[in-house]
Image (tube, rainbow, N blue to C red):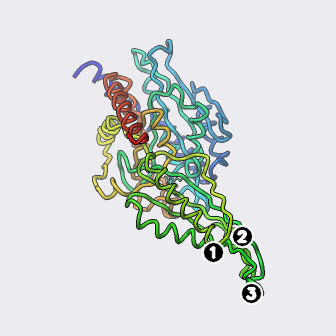
Amino acid sequence: MTDNEERLIELKDRVCRSIDETREKLHRLSQDIWSCPELAYQETEAHDRLVAFFTHEHGWTVDSHFKLETAFRATWRTGGDSEGTMNVGFLCEYDALPGIGHACGHNLIAEVGAAAAVGLKAALEGAQEGVPVQVTVLGTPAEEDVGGKIDLLKEGAFKGIDVVFMAHPSKEDATYLPCVAEHDVTIKYHGKTTHASSYPWRGVNALDAAVLCYNNLSVLRQQMRPDWRVHGIIKHGGLKPNIIPDYTELEYYLRTPTRAELPVLKEKAERCFRSAAVATGCTVEVEYARNQLDNILRVAELERLFERNGKTLGMDFTTDEDVLRNESGSTDFGNVTFAVPGIHPYFYIGSNALNHTPEYTVAAGDEKAQFFTLRTAKALAMTALDLLLQPEAMQRVMQEFTEVKLKDDKMSNGV
Ligand SMILES: NCCC[C@H](NC(=O)CCN)C(=O)O
């Protein structure tokens, strides 16, 4: 075994020990966030708790309200000049869901990011030969909405970060689960009210338009690729049965496995929106969310390193092809992966509950989740050490990142 390999093992042990030594503070942080669920862009308490956590941990430079009201940044760097310093990013999410609190366990995402950063810093602080590194923690709000990470990307918050890590609670350990491109859209129909019984023929029925739109999209599914998704709700359908509705509103999520396919689906969906207006005589407004979520650009080398570290800690990565190929959602982390190589693995939290259910809310606040949460943080920090102490590993990551980006560019440009 080489000296460097021995050093890596020692530093990885130090990461695990320091995270275990901080577990009480980390659990309290996670519990404080879990017990005060806040919606996207309204995560003021969670922001304050995380800012206070890093402020009280020595050595961190903390920027509260960093580019967004409820975003933050905490940085720590080893001494020496900035030349050759690798900037390792860890992301914290902390927004909850309406009506069911932290049913996606974002309190645990925040805890994983904080724990991994604290563990990596502790390991490197004591390293004999300096390892030039900056550790950057970014608090990224509103993942469940239009995506705070995308806002932060636009504001340059990820500039200078060389590799980025986060992890998401799930019902199994997985180095990756399909994360698809998505664009949210609101469709508004405007008609004309009249008495629905006395003289309905004088009205223009916006609810008819909404129902036709819903049905148009429902029949479109037969002609969609099986891995595309179109799903939505009628947010406003009218005021009273005897008033022909003059305003209705629908919200839909349009999803495709790659960002290159999304324009194709959007064009088909828009025909459904607009034909409902034509058929009823309504006017229609189509409003897309300001941010489109991209699919995750995968870097297999990062996933391999993470899986190797996770297995040494006892993680049991799923091999269920059905899960690995089909069960998917979207995340604004996808947009980050087109700017910075990164991984977004999933981790079991001691429950078979499904995300976005009240049962998952309970599981995310259960002390039983702590062991799995801290184990995941250790594996992330250990993977960061692999890159810091093995330059050839980071070179492989960058080479692969360049290749997959080029392949995506060609697909997006129809090459
Ligand atoms: N409009 C954004 C929705 C994102 C949401 N993300 C997830 O559920 C991943 C876990 N937080 C989605 O519906 O996919």
What's the residue at 47%, 49% (across, down)?
181
Q: Residues within 10 Å of mark 1 (few under 14, many from 20)?
A: many
Which amino acid type is marked by label 2?
Gly
Query: Which badge, 3 or 2, is on the more N-terminal residue?
Result: 2
Which amino acid type is marked by label 3?
Ser
Disc 3, SS: loop
Left or right for 283, reference 253: right
How far apart are labels 3 and 1 at the CA level?
Answer: 16 Å
Q: Residues within 10 Å of mark 2 (few under 14, many from 20)?
A: many
Which residue, given by chain and number where applicable, does mark 1 sit on? 208
What's the residue at 45%, 46% (across, down)?
259
Q: Nearer the viewer, residue 330 or 194?
A: 194
Q: Position of residue 18 (x, y in %)?
A: 44, 33
Which residue, given by chain and number where applicable, does mark 2 sit on? 191
Which amino acid type is marked by label 1?
Asp
In the rendered view of the protein, which quadrant contains the N terminus? top left
Q: Position of residue 350 (x, y in %)?
A: 40, 56
Which residue, given by chain and number where applicable, does mark 3 sit on? 197
Rendered view: 383 above or below 98: above
